[in-house]
Amino acid sequence: MRNTDIQTLISEATVLLKEMVAIPSPSFNEDDVCSHICGWMTERNIGHKRIGNNIISEHIVDPTAPTLMLCAHMDTVLPCEGYTFDPYRPENCPDDRIQGLGSNDDGASVVSMIATFRYFLGSDKNLLLVLTCEEERSGLNGMTGLWAQIRDKVDYAIVGEPTGMRAATAERGLLVIDATAHGISGHAARNEGVNAIDIALDDIQRLKSHRFEKISPRMGKVNLNVTQINAGTAHNVIPDICTFVIDIRPTEQYTNEEICRELQGICKSTLKPRNLSNLSSATGEGSRLQRTAEKLGIDTFSSPTTSDWMRIDCDAIKMGPGESSRSHKKDEFVYIKEIEGGVRTYIEFIEQL
């Protein structure tokens, strides 16, 4: 498409984003928004195929040349409390923005990548557009299951997430551990039993004080926080069970298994990881993607949040319109100028690459 068509592509992208926001699409319930985007692409003669609730569109001109994947996710979290407007009614927002659940994370990247893909239709660029489901909940039917089917077609990737169009060249992994402290129940009036809460609190204090020795040059130290705790059945019963949840953001210096073993060694509570496969990611040494970002003066950084990047094993960066600080919060929004900036930066990046 000609350069004069960029503004049209951006305008259509903003309309599509409003339509997406109006369709509830929490993880595992993306069927309606996936169908809507497929219909929208069909109306514009954009070839694509649907695999479950994932959408793939190929523009492969030369099978012997490298292919860049543009990847973003269609699902959202559930709306949090405190919204001052209906999270599914984007039509009443100020003129300079699109507001509503999923507008920033990750709808802005979805529509910006679709617009970018459309711009290069008919060009000599090898591109693969992949829109996924279940990203927010690490579901098996999104990129986790899809990657094996497309990996042979992909040489490198841009993962679309709200980064302010800065390029993340590393991101932390995610390790969630369910911990259970075991005590002995008894009557509180007689000071009977062994209080599981006391055991849990001792372990939590050990966890707060623990320091992992290996520090990542890119990401720094491993981050650990206890985020939930639950115990007790009645005011007069010493609880024999206390459960708590540990949220850990690993770096490349440790495997998730190593972290689990190290923490179990300092805790009396039983630690059980929910998933060991959410690993940290980093752009490869000497990466063409990183060199391109540097040539264009795009800031690079290490991201504290996870994405579909951890589910692929090709060279990648994470970059998209919007701001991570607005994600998973009330009154989510994205500025229209951010979408325009995203499309223009993606185009410039691909042309330079």
Image: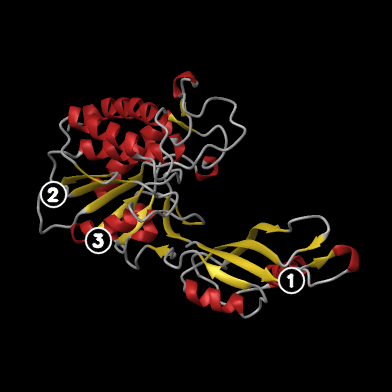
Q: Amino acid at mark 3?
A: Ala
Residue mark closest to the camera, 3 vs 1: 1
N-terminal of the pair, mark 3 or mark 2, is 2
**What amino acid type is highlighted by mark number 1?**
Ile
Residue at point 54%, 69% (across, down): 272
Kind of residue sitting beneath label 2? Ile
Residue that label 1 marks: 199
Q: Position of residue 170 (x, y in %)?
A: 43, 61
Q: Residue at x 42, y 66 (%)?
A: 277
Asked whether residue 41 is in view, the answer is yes
Point out residue 14 in the picture as x, y percentages from the top left corner.
36, 27
Q: Residues within 10 Å of mark 2 (few under 14, many from 20)?
A: some
Q: Nearer the viewer, residue 258 or 188?
A: 188
Secondary structure type for disc 2: loop
- Of the pair 112 and 144, the residue shown nearer to us: 144
- The spot of residue 259 in percent (x, y) is 54, 74
Cβ–Cβ under 8 Å for marks 3 and 2: no
Nearest the viewer among 238 and 275 is 238
Instruction: Tell me which label, 1 or 2, sits earlier in the chain.
Output: 2
Q: Quadrant of the N terminus?
A: top left
**Is residue 34 found left or right of 221 in the rendered image?**
left
Mark 1 or 2, which is nearer the eye?
1
Residue under pointer 3: 148
Which residue is denoted by mark 2 in the rendering? 60
Q: Position of residue 172 (x, y in %)?
A: 48, 61
